[in-house]
Image (cartoon, coloured by chain):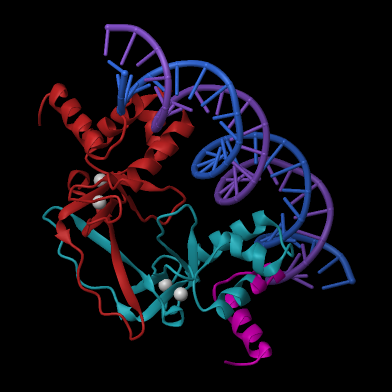
Chain colours: A red, B cyan, C purple, D blue
DNA sequence: TGTAATTTTGCAACAATGTTGCAAATAAAA
DNA sequence: TTTTATTTGCAACATTGTTGCAAAATTACA
């Protein structure tokens, strides 16, 4: 698990490696991501962190993390946009998250199934594939 | 293809079968869906149909169609919610669309690949699967 | 370590999207 | 046609996301 000290250190390194300034907001948001063990959406930050930072700053921070390959988006069928930290070596220009996402219909939580690879898809002729998103809906471990 | 007359007849039957009143708004929205051959999002209706009906009515109509199994949602990584008509025998309580969706990165259009089944996914122990959503991003036939 | 250059933040103002209650209009049933 | 039930449009509001700009914080450098 690691101490709070170690987490902070890990986050600073991550930000430095991404050539980003180390700021309170960025550190706090990454802390929330890393503790959460799953996907977060914008409104979660206000709930989890109270009013400790501005809405606009959260939007801009998430945008920055996306561009730097620190987090990735997860498709949803509602209005909310969900994000999770990238585990593999994602970079500014290429994401390498090829895992399945799981959305629990009971608790609402979305999880990255890092060990579950997305399957091969055979497209009809004429379509060029860039990447595949898989979201499984069901009931998670803790909810059944 | 079929004449305009035939389309209208088909739509009336569909609404009657779903036990829904036949109203101008519902007919118009279904026409747009059936002509579009792909997914539509809320803002498309204002573009395609002008101001012929109220925003609120469109929201409520889409909600009704969803509940009746006439249309289904397609997951996205942006804020917009996309819908497409169900081709198979979807009902009020169970959707049977088990096909792959394709989002073209060039033209932005989302297509139902009705012939392309979603593959089997092997989940980790402890997860119960209800349904699987697959969205492929790439370049479509007409764009390359 | 202190100062200048650069980047990030917070606020205000706005735009877009989605929801609810309610009376008027429309469609279905009798 | 008349009655009853459903749907629509409007107003008002809530939530989500965007932009410009000055103040604050961070980084670079002497
Ligand atoms: Mn993930
Ligand atoms: Mn579809
Ligand atoms: Zn759960
Ligand atoms: Zn295309």
Q: Quadrant of residue B140?
A: bottom left
Magenta span includes A42: no
The picture places residue B117, in percent across and down from the top left corner, at 29, 77
Q: Residue at the spot x=29%, y=66% of the render? A: A131
* Up-down relation of residue A39 to residue B15 (above or below): above
Examine the rendering and report whether any part of residue A109 can be seen.
no
Q: Residue at the spot x=57%, y=92% of the render? A: B1
Residue in the foreground of this view, choosing between A43 and D30: D30
Q: Quadrant of residue B97?
A: bottom left
* Up-down relation of residue A37 to residue A2 (above or below): below
* Up-down relation of residue D18 to residue B66 (above or below): above
Examine the rendering and report whether any part of residue A104 can be seen.
yes
* Magenta span main SS: helix
The picture places residue D18, in percent across and down from the top left corner, at 54, 44
**Residue range of the region highlighted in magenta in the rendering:** B1-28
* Up-down relation of residue D2 to residue A33 (above or below): below
The picture places residue A43, in percent across and down from the top left corner, at 42, 36
Q: Residue at the spot x=15%, y=59% of the render? A: A116
Magenta span includes B3: yes
Is C29 situated left or right of B80 in this image?
right
Is B108 situated left or right of A20 in this image?
right
């Amino acid at each position: 698990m690691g101490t709070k000290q170690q987490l902070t250190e890990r986050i600073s390194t991550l930000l430095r490696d991404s050539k980003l300034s180390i700021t309170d907001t960025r550190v706090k948001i990454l802390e929330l991501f890393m503790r959460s063990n799953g996907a977060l959406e914008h409104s979660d930050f206000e709930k989890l962190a109270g009013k400790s930072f501005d809405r606009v700053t959260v939007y801009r921070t998430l945008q920055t993390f996306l561009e730097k390959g620190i987090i990735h988006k997860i498709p949803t069928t509602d209005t909310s946009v969900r994000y999770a930290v990238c585990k593999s070596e994602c970079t500014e220009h290429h994401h390498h998250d090829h895992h399945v996402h799981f959305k629990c219909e009971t608790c609402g939580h979305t999880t990255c199934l890092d060990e579950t690879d997305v399957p091969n898809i055979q497209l009809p002729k004429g379509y060029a594939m860039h990447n595949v998103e898989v979201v499984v809906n069901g009931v998670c471990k803790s909810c059944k």
